[in-house]
Image (spheres, helix red, strand yellow):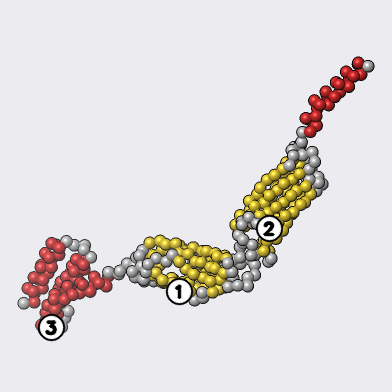
Amino acid sequence: MKIKKAFSIFLIFLMLLSLPNALALSKMLVSVSVNHYSSDLGELIVIAGKISNEAGYPIQNALVSLQVNNPNGSVVHIALVYSSRNGTFKDEFSLSNDAPEGNYTIYVITSKTGYEDFRTTISLSLFFSDFLIVASPNPIELKQGENQQVLITLISNKPLNFTVLLQVSGLPKGVKYSLNQTFVTPFKASALTIEASKEAEAGTYNVTIIGAGKGKVRYANINLTIVESKVNLTPILVLAAFFAIAPTLIVFLKKIKKRKELKFDQKYLAYARALAKLEELKAQRRISNEDYEKLREEYEKKLKKDSE
């Protein structure tokens, strides 16, 4: 009798000793992915994942609880799904085009008897691609006093039934613009003319094209470079040289008039050409003032001597 009682106590002791191991819960390994796709009705959000045990075998009939909050903190979607035979699960829902843009928070909880609950939080950045603004050509370069046309086009991957207001900002002082169409619709274009005055400050600027419609705002940047316009000095130098040699030419013409012979005097022509070349060198600053005065005096003396 005493032996049976002792054996019973021993069995109870073994049961109590093994109880913590019996109550220990296994861990679930969960992978979750979130994707979104554009459609005519809005954005399609797809949440998918797979559940397995620590040995890598799939867990079937695990309960998956999903909750999605929008950027304002409001709950926009709740779902309960079960994992399939191969441990996978999937849920999808749609957001309308009027849904707020920003970071959406997705809460995922998986549970099953005999396993520890699994919890995770996923952030999804969502920005609806209603339309894009494209500027061409870009970048552009303008000289002071010039203008150039840039084509502003709206591109969309879905039909839109509203117009977009175009505006331009970031132009430097002395530069103005005009749009042949202020309101445009997707797949239509507006011609933007940028005109730089002669007083426009040279440099590189970032010009922003702004498109706003139905609460949506999109931007496009144009890299604009203003360069200084160089003055062509050649006509000025030629004119200055002409007025400089005018007195010498008068002497030369008087000499030609006084000549009794009609034959052209090559000697005087050579002097005149030399003087013209001398004035040109001086205007281009390719000869010193000292050399210029010396040579000019020498040529004029020769012309005066031969004209007497």
**Residue 178 image label:** 1
Closer to the chain start, of discs 1 and 3, is 1
Where on the picture, by quarter, is residue 11? top right
For label 3, the residue is 257
**Residue 76 image label:** 2
Q: Is disc 2 placed on a helix, strand or loop? A: strand
Where on the picture, by quarter, is residue 237? bottom left
Closer to the chain start, of discs 2 and 3, is 2
Q: Is disc 1 placed on a helix, strand or loop? A: strand
Residue 275: horizontal and vertical position, in percent?
16, 70
> Which kind of residue does numbered mark 2 sit on?
Val
Residue for point 37% across, 69% down = 174
Circle nearer the viewer, 1 or 3: 1
Residue for point 72% across, 51% down = 66
Residue for point 55% across, 65% down = 217
Label 1 and label 3: CA atoms lie apart by 62 Å
In the displayed structure, 298 sits above or below 112; it is below
- Indicate the quadrant containing the N terminus: top left, top right, bottom left or bottom right: top right
Residue 216: horizontal and vertical position, in percent?
57, 65
In the displayed structure, 204 sits above or below 55; it is below
> Which kind of residue does numbered mark 1 sit on?
Ser
Residue for point 79% across, 33% down = 23
Q: Is residue 293 left or right of residue 203?
A: left
Q: Can the viewer see residue 223 in this picture? A: yes
Closer to the chain start, of discs 1 and 2, is 2
Q: Is residue 159 left or right of residue 84?
A: left
Marks 1,2: beta carbons within 8 A: no
Label 1 and label 2: CA atoms lie apart by 44 Å
Depth order, front residue of 98/197:
98
Label 2 and label 3: CA atoms lie apart by 104 Å
Mark 1: give few (<14), some (14-19) or many (20+) Cα within 10 Å. Answer: some
